[in-house]
Every structure is written in structure tokens, then in C-alpha cells.
Amino acid sequence: MPSRASFRWVGDRAILRELSGDLVGANRAARVLRAELAELAAGEVEDLIPGARSVLVLLREGTEASGELLEMLAGEHLGAASSERSGRLHEIPLAYGGADGEDLKEVARLHGLSEKAVVLAHSAVVYEVGFIGFSPGFPYLFGLPATLATPRLATPRTRVPAGSIAIGGEWTGIYPRATPGGWRLIGRTDVVLFDPRCDPPALLAPGDQVRFLSR
Amino acid sequence: MSVRVLRPGMLTTVQDLGRPGLGALGVPPSGAMDGFALRLANRLVGNEDGAAGLELTLLGPEILFEADCAIALAGAHFDAQLAGRPLPHAEAVQVRGGETLALGRALDGLRGYLAFSGGITVEAVLGSRSTFLPAGFGGFAGRALRAGDMLSLARGKEPDALRRLRPGALAGPASPAVVRVVIGPQSEAFSAAGHATFLASSYSVSSRSDRMGVRLEGAPIERVAAADLPPEGLAPGAIQVPGDGQPIILGADRPTTGGYTKIATVISVDLSLVAQARPGDALRFAAVDVAEARRFWREREELLASALEPLDR
């Protein structure tokens, strides 16, 4: 069986490559590997789906993985030499708390902080987009202060309002549209994160930086 | 050339073979849940495999044809009447302008695929005509069909392109019964007892299933590690097991990434069985390896290539 340092098959047409190291380093290594795999332009590859610390290679139906592809997936891929912050900076205006962030009070209570302290800490950071996942345009943002890391809700909401800024574990993110969701809602923005008729359709890209501006 | 929806059915959407390749934007592939059945329906009317058709769910629509065209129904068998005559299954039929196709309940399976010669020409969004209901884009106005909707069709091929499925050529199981899987990617997160439960139990398809995931109810699968992972890309047919131990088979509208451990992944050929499983149906799982799964795929493709014959003329 493949070791942790290698890749593993997921069904008969997908291969998962996980990267080792701390989360930020592994995420950057995964981004570099994904870019290298895209550059290989292997005809058998249908999609390269980035994860927090992994890349999932989806093969076209009925194709075989080439030796070149498997060799690249089996390589070392250390994050050390990967690109540092290089993306665009986006400023996201939002309203924190109250009806716009129903869980702000509870997040503050869990951490023994005032709501104002949570807002100050959350808006003081320049975040980095680790990957877009879950639903169209949903950014997983790195950089949440450890003092704000909060477990997901035990029972997810059936409907999170569009534009909600939320905390899920050590991540913060933005719900581009109304979906079910288990993250803690602390604020809301009017910024449109995903429009299928725009090019590119997603506002944010991996490596981009995000700052929240409290209204 | 167009058709008018007189009655929409339970959940009828425009689908093609999806918009693959956009996982990095968080955009799922969508497309037909039973892609094989849509391909078959398209081939019967002389279309490319990826032409857009209708995915019908449990209760089909009633459609008025405003011009002549050819149609074919594949996937689940439906009670179907074209201008008062029974519509054959998996066989191209010429329709005249002014005729009405009335589709009733599915007689077996869950999803039928109705192909029109030329294909439905709704505007492509992000490279596909598939409907992605949760975000409301693609297909017809990003939603399921309603009474009064008009669907435009492209011009089809000549009538000698029409085909029927040779009787008995693709005989599948009447009910899904056994779904084959490749174990993993997180097999180590489950105990030996959990694996034994997964492979030995019968699971019932929940009524809360949809195109994102087929939810199963049955013996909880025991784990040895937490249910949560750093989010990672999700493959079609991945079987995630949340904390409650009840498996969910991910479908065409699945989230692109997710953080639940996955015990196994349904093999490509058996995604059709999952797509056709109705609420209340019983499913069992059987493990195969990647090489076998790929052989099953090739065998079915060979079967499909030789399974169609011209209509008697």
C-alpha cells in the first residue's frame, strides 16, 4: 500500500496526493504541486482539485494515468521553496455581529473575550486564500488568530445567509451564497464572491490576500 | 424548433455530461447522475454523447412538441405515452409536431433520460448546459422545469442515424442490490469491525437523498479515528462517513471538497446503480480493486459500442 509520503487511489479514476508538514507549508506545497501538474497538461487529467493540504487528480473516464503523472505525484514536493504571498489584496467591507453575525456573541463568550475584542482581532489580520472549496467561490482563509479558533457547530444550520463571514476551526471563510453550513457566523458582506458569468467567476484565488474592513 | 413543458414532473432538469475541470473554483461537475444512461439516450437519436437532454426523477413531465424531431428514453423505465401510444424504452422514436409525450411514474429505478435529436440548446454556463440547482445556474434558468417553459432544440441528424438497443444487450439488475467499491482513501480511520459492518450490512436509501449525495441508513460504521480531516477534493462516488456512522455516497452536485473520512469509493460503472436507487431501496457493498474496476468500465464500453442497431425502416 502507498505510504503517507506517496499517493493513494480514490476509486478507479482519482488519485489523492497529500503533502506533509504544518498546514500553511503543506498548503503552499499543494498549490505548487497543483501548478506543476497543470503545466504537465497530461491529456488524461480531467480536474486537479486542491484541498487544505492535498491535490486530488481526477482522470478522464476510460484513461490510464501516465508514468509521467505518477512520477510527479510520487515526488518529494516540500513546501519550503514554494511561492510566498504574491496574490492580489482584496478588502472586504462587512458588518460584524448582531443580525449580521449571529454567533459573534457566542464566539466571544467561548474565548472569554468581548465582542469588540473578537472584531478587532479578526479584522487586524491580512489573510491568505489557501484554496477555494466546498461550494462555488468559497474561500478557505489562513491566518485566523489562534485565540479565535472555534469548533464548528455540533448541528450545522440548514441555511447560512449569503455573504456570511464565519469561523470554522482554525479557518475563516465567506459563504458566497445561501447554503447549509456548520461554521460560526460573525459578520456579513455584500461583496459578490462568485458569478458564473464573470471571467474569472470567483473573486478570490489561492494565494490572494484578504483584509476585512469593519463598517 | 422547440418543445413546451405542459407539466413539469417531480424534478426535471436539463443535464449534459457536466462541467468537469472547475474543482479549483469550488464548482462541482453536475451533469447527469446516470451519465451512462444519458449517453445511451443520445446515441439512440444520433447525438454526440454529451448533448443536453432531460433528467427525469420518479415522476416524468408532459411535453408538447411544436415541430418534428426524434426522441429516446433511457435509464429508468417510465410509464410513457406518445400521442396515446406506449413509448418504447431505449429506442428512438420519430415525433410529429403537435404530438404530446406524457410521462408518468418510474416503473423501476429513479432517473430517466430523455434525449432529443439535436439536443437542447439552452445557453452553456462555464462550458456546460447542466443545471446546478443549489447555486441556480446552468440548464434552463438555473432551475428545474416548470409548466410553460419552452426548450429550444438544435437540428438533429437524418433519420437513418436513429437506433434501438438490441433486446437484452445491456441487461442490468432490476434493483441496484450490490454496488461495487474500491476501499479507501481513509480505510485506516475505520475499525476492522467497521469495515465488516460496511461490507456485510444492507443499507436503506434515505428520502433525504438528492443530486449532492445519496444518504444511507443502517448499521453505523465504527471508526478508530475522528470523523474530521483537513478538507480534501472529493471524487465521484466517494462514500463519506460523518460522526453518526451513516454513509453518504457523493453525487454529481457534491461539494468539491469536504472534511469527512471516506471508507470507500463507488466504481465508475456502478455510479449508474447509485443514481437509480430509490428512497427505501436496499444497497449492499462489495469490494473490488482498481484494476478490476477499470476492466468493468472497458467491458461496458465495448458492450455499449455493439449494443445498438438501426431501426427497421
Image (cartoon, coloured by chain):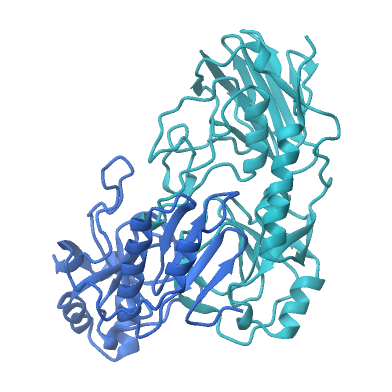
Chain colours: A blue, B cyan
Q: Is residue A158 visible?
A: no
Residue furthest to the front in view is A67
Image quarter of residue B188: bottom right
- Say whether residue A109 is left or right of residue A90: right
Please tell me which residue is depicted at 34% across the width and 63% down the height of the picture: A36
Between B263 and A79, the one lying in front of the other is A79
- Say whether residue B312 is left or right of residue A46: right
Q: Is residue B155 above or below residue A143?
A: above
Please tell me which residue is depicted at 29% across the width and 65% down the height of the picture: A99
- Say whether residue B152 is left or right of residue A124: right
Q: Is residue B300 above or below residue B129?
A: below
Q: Where is residue A11? Give x, y as percent.
A: 62, 63
Please tell me which residue is depicted at 55% across the width and 25% down the height of the picture: B147
Between B148 and B160, the one lying in front of the other is B160
Between A36 and B98, the one lying in front of the other is A36
Q: Where is residue B204? Give x, y as percent.
A: 76, 61
Q: Where is residue B235? Give x, y as percent.
A: 54, 60
